[in-house]
Image (cartoon, helix red, strand yellow):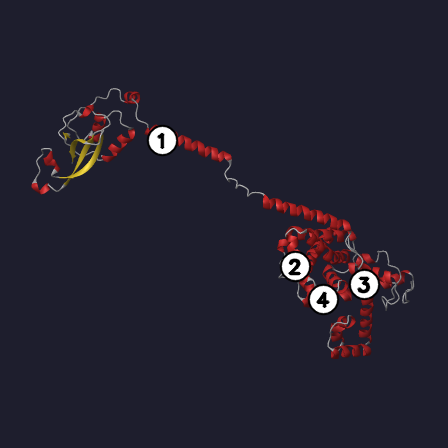
Amino acid sequence: MNCHEFESYVLDLTRDRLIDAAIRECALGHAENCSQCAARLTEERALLVGIRSVIAEISEKETPARVETSLLAAFRTQTLAAATRATKPMPVRRNRFGWRTVAVAAAIVLMLSALLAVWLRPDTPQRQTGKEPNRPEKTMPAPATADDGNRDVVNVKDSSAPRRRKRRLVATNPDKAEFTTQFFPLMGSAEDLSTLENVRLVRVELPGSALSDVGLRVVPENRNTPVKADVVLGPDGSARAIRFVR
Amino acid sequence: MTNPSGSNDAELFRQTLAGDEHAFTELYRRHQAFVYRFALLMSGSTTIAEEVVQEVFLALIRDGHRYDPARALLSSYLGGIARNHVLRLLARERNFVPLVDDADEADAVPPPQLIGPDDPFGNCARNETSRLLRQAVLALPARYREVVVLCDFQELSNADAALMLGCPPGTVNSRLHRGHALLLKKLREMGSRCAAAEDTKGMRCFV
């Protein structure tokens, strides 16, 4: 064993740790023959004595009692806080939007509701007369032209019809170039359509043979060809008149 | 650091987490001395040692759920926390009280002439030996000091010290050897200075 190897075992030798007996004998033999390693071993043994004296000195040292007292107080506080958290009801999750945002959203909803209500409200006679004071009413059955389309029908049959209905009727007849026939009364009713209230105009498709029902002449090969027609429905939903569209 | 009551520690720890004050008290009384002595030897200050003990067990109270009994003994866990607090407090104290280094040691108050250059502890009184040795330990760099404190003064095995310090056992072993070499060197220097101060260089010191 050389000095370098002895150095790696010197701590185990002085502390009586588990070490192979052969190595131990070899290291001690080296220390007997090497003065430097012998001095090293002596120093380590002296150091061990000093360490043991320090251990004996501090073995009685412990943390003051006041630390335990303060720690127990902290433990009780922590335990109490944990118990409080456990018994406290689950907090209501706060709305991530502030109350101002909610208020603005509510105001917008209210405004939209008001606008919708105004939009759906039936036109009052004052408004109608106010908007179109001098508009002449047309009588039924009047020959329709390509210019007036179904708008004439609406004005004729019900001046107090809701605006929504007007829009629907206009939407059903977007083509300004279509031609219409006059209104033919149905079900044998000869009543004046202009006197009816709350009538509706519905665009339908009928077989060409329907033209013959109102007295129009139909070519035999066109009897099954679909033709467009506007049907006037009375307040009770029954068809009162019809006109054909091309 | 092999703790024969390790399983009891785990049970006490579980009860502590459940809010059992007696279990916490028992845990504290089992481990406070180890933490206190480690901090005292590392810092040389009873004030710091008390503060470290307080911080360690407060951490156990507040963040005890972070400890996994399957991974390490409770004493290793507490020792690791204590080590971190000690190093932090020593760094803080360094801002106010500079540590004595080699350059300053010549101006430091020489220890009593108790040590001969050839036999540091042969004829020293027990208390003075202890005081000198603790002074020398405090002069060690922290990475060697903690290993010397754990393996020599706290009598942990290299493996347990490695577990607590979070480094391989081989590192602990090499640091221990290096720490001993530094420790003996400082003790020799102390002995030389005290001998020179009394103009008794080369002679043994006597109480």
Q: Is residue B169 above or below residue A192?
A: below
Q: Earlier in the sequence, mark 3 or mark 2?
A: 2
The CA span between labels 3 and 4 is: 25 Å
Q: Is residue A223 above or below residue A61?
A: above
Circle 2 packing at 10 Å, graded few (<14), some (14-19), many (20+), is some
Q: Give the amino acid type for the residue marked by disc 4 in the picture.
A: Ser
Q: Is residue A13 above or below residue A225?
A: below
Asked whether disc 2 touches disc 4, contact meaning CB atoms under 8 Å apart, the reply is: no
Asked whether disc 4 touches disc 1, contact meaning CB atoms under 8 Å apart, the reply is: no
Q: Secondary structure at mark 3?
A: helix
Q: Give the amino acid type for the residue marked by disc 1 in the picture.
A: Leu
- Residue hosting label 1: A116
Quadrant assignment, res A219: top left
The CA span between labels 1 and 3 is: 94 Å
Badge 4: chain ID: B
Q: Residue at the location (48% across, 35% down)?
A: A101
In terms of depth relative to the viewer, which is nearer, B103 or A83? A83
Circle 4 packing at 10 Å, graded few (<14), some (14-19), many (20+), is some
Circle 3 packing at 10 Å, graded few (<14), some (14-19), many (20+), is many
Looking at the rendered image, the quarter that the C terminus of chain B falls into is bottom right
Q: Give the amino acid type for the residue marked by disc 3 in the picture.
A: Lys
- Residue hosting label 2: B10
Looking at the rendered image, the quarter that the N terminus of chain B falls into is bottom right
3 or 2: mark nearer the eye: 2
Badge 3: chain ID: B
Q: Which mark is residue B157?
A: 4
- Residue hosting label 3: B186
